[in-house]
Image (cartoon, rainbow, N blue to C red):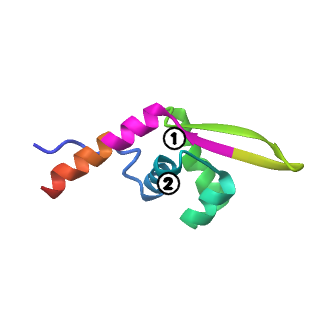
Amino acid sequence: MFKNLNPLLHSQLRLSIISYLVSNGKSNFNALKDITKATSGNISVQLKKLEKVNYIRITKGFLNNYQHTSIEITNTGIDAFEEYVKAIKQYIK
């Protein structure tokens, strides 16, 4: 029997964000926006959804007198991604 896919990660944009963070551990808002080609508003909404379930940690501050938003994947986020990949592999076999 196939496992259900995590609906939070099954969204293309959220999956792109988590995949990038799994590979890099950390990023900033503008880098994620550039990589995903999404709008600022859409990225913000998706980041809030991922933060709400503790998949990522968002830290806001200043860097060289400019607002800076840092995004870091959590262990919960890594575990969720690994489970998602396992579930996808079942579909491929």
Three-letter code for the amino acid on which mark 2 is drawn: Tyr
Find the magenta span and give its range: 70-82
Secondary structure of the residue carrying tag 2 is helix
Q: Where residue 29 appears, x then y in whole percent?
A: 66, 52
Quadrant assignment, res 91 = bottom left
Cα–Cα gap, marks 2 and 1: 14 Å
Q: Is residue 90 left or right of residue 72?
A: left
Q: Is 61 left or right of 23, judged from the image as shown?
A: right
Q: Residues within 10 Å of mark 2 (few under 14, many from 20)?
A: some
Of 52 and 33, nearer the camera is: 33
User: Residue 71 location, x and y as percent?
Assistant: 62, 44
Among the 4 quarters of the image, the one containing residue 2: top left
Residue drawn at (16%, 49%) of the image: 90
Would residue 81 be counted in the magenta stretch?
A: yes
- Front residue of 5 and 77: 77
**Identity, as a three-letter code, of the amino acid under mark 1:** Leu
Q: Which residue is mark 1?
A: 50
Residue 58 included in the magenta stretch of the image: no
Within-10-Å neighbours for mark 1: few <14, some 14–19, many 20+: many
Residue at mark 2: 20
